[in-house]
Image (cartoon, grey):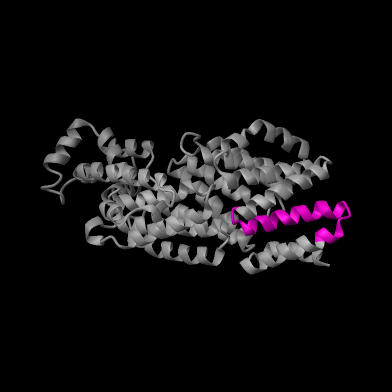
Amino acid sequence: MTHLSDAEIGRFLASRLDPADEQRVARHVLAGCGVCGRKLVAGAPARLLDEAGDGGCRRAVRSSLRERAVAAALRQEDRWRTDEGKLERSLELLRESPQGYDGLTVRQIRELHGRALVEALLERSRELRYQDPRGMRWLAYNAVQAAGSLRPEEHGPSLFDLQARAWACLANAYKVNYEFAEAEGALTRARALHPRGSGDPGLLAHLASTEAYLKSVRGRMIEAYELFDRVYRLHLKLGNRHLAGESLIAKAATMDDAGTPRQGIPLFRRGLALLDPDRDPQLVSVGQHGLINLTARSGDYRKAGELLLKSGLRQAFADAPLALGKVRWLEGKILDGIGRPASAERVLLEVRTELLDLGRLSDAAIVGLDLIQILLRQGKSLQVRELARESYDTLRSLGILQEAARIRPYLQ
């Protein structure tokens, strides 16, 4: 969930925000955000806590925005403590169960039913994005179902924020699995729910970032870049440097597909400089991988090789076979670039086999495109035709037409 920054909360408590921003912060807390509510209570002076506790409930109409927001935060403290316990319990069960959500018993699901279970499903779905994309999608789907079962009268406008986040998570999961039409459908549902919620601008930025990526997949790069830039500026305005860095990395990652890899390198560097490593170490590793990949795609293979050796990406992704496979895929491309085609062929054949074993048919087919070019330069025409046909058929059947079109010339 996108929350208020510490700086925003501090300025709100000190009455140093302009009226529009003051209303936005108050609306976010009044909508039921427990994380920001706790920060508000922790930072509020004793006088304001007394006023909110004594008068905030009895004279809500005449109370200031600050008093009403702090009063709402105080009222939800007990409920938040209960929900926090459920959240930790839900995450513990999801992480321990080999089958994820499917491994929970009916009794466990009933016991954990509610907002905490939805939050745990969303958190666990995000954790799996580099390890198990299909598991990520299934958890996101169950988060959508669980959020849809909650009653608005018990949760207020924040429920629609939660439901929008669940649909956005499902859209991202579809995107990771190359199911772009389904991703656009889920994003449409998320955008329809957003106006009914608290009006959280951070959530709106998250939806816009997903939309930007989907536009880039469809080849609408100018629109995609405009959206990424808008998201970046909004996160900076909200004081979310980490999310601003994430938006730059997302934009840079699309520049290889646009045929402008060199332009993406400075964006990756700027994005990495904004990230908080403690908040999402996986994203830092993904950003490093993207920077090295674009360096190689720009033709500087020796520099890319040096960066890869120093990156520690193999260790970072030791427990994430899919992400580790993509690191080795990059290693194969670098080996080819520095004039070692036989070694590159061996690595890419191994990576392709591993991806097929993981059920990642789309990624294996795209690895095939790099492998085809290496085989062709070595005069292995028969292998080229067989691999081209297999990769082309796979990509066509999955609807990944842009990559399929790149393989078509090798079919003859």
394 versus 108 height, above or below? below
Q: Is residue 266 left or right of residue 134?
A: right
> Would you place residue 181 above or below residue 335 in this image?
below
Magenta stretch: includes residue 313: no
What residue range appears in magenta?
358-384
65 is higher (above) or lower (below) than 302: below
| Residue 258 visible to the viewer | no
Vertically, is 311 above or below 176?
A: above
Q: Which residue does the image show at 76% across and 46% down from the upper left? A: 346
Q: Quadrant of residue 13?
A: top left
**Across the whole image, how many numbered discs are drawn on residues?**
0
- Place of residue 222 in the rendered image (x, y in percent of width and height, measured from the top left): 62, 58
Q: Nearer the viewer, residue 359 or 218?
A: 359
Q: Nearer the viewer, residue 68 or 294?
A: 294
The image shows residue 289 at horizontal and vertical percentages of 63, 41
Percent coordinates x, y for residue 65 in the rendering: 24, 46
Q: What is the quadrant of residue 180 in the picture?
A: bottom right
Q: Is residue 191 visible?
A: yes
Residue 136: horizontal and vertical position, in percent?
48, 53
Residue 293 vs residue 132: left or right? right
Closer to the camera, 18 or 293?
Answer: 293
Farthest right residue in view: 379
Q: Residue at x 42, y 65 (%)?
A: 189
> Which residue occupies 57% across, 49% down?
250
Q: Is residue 370 magenta?
A: yes
Prevailing secondary structure of the magenta residues: helix
Q: Quadrant of the C terminus?
A: bottom right
Horizontal side, residue 181 vs residue 392: left or right = left
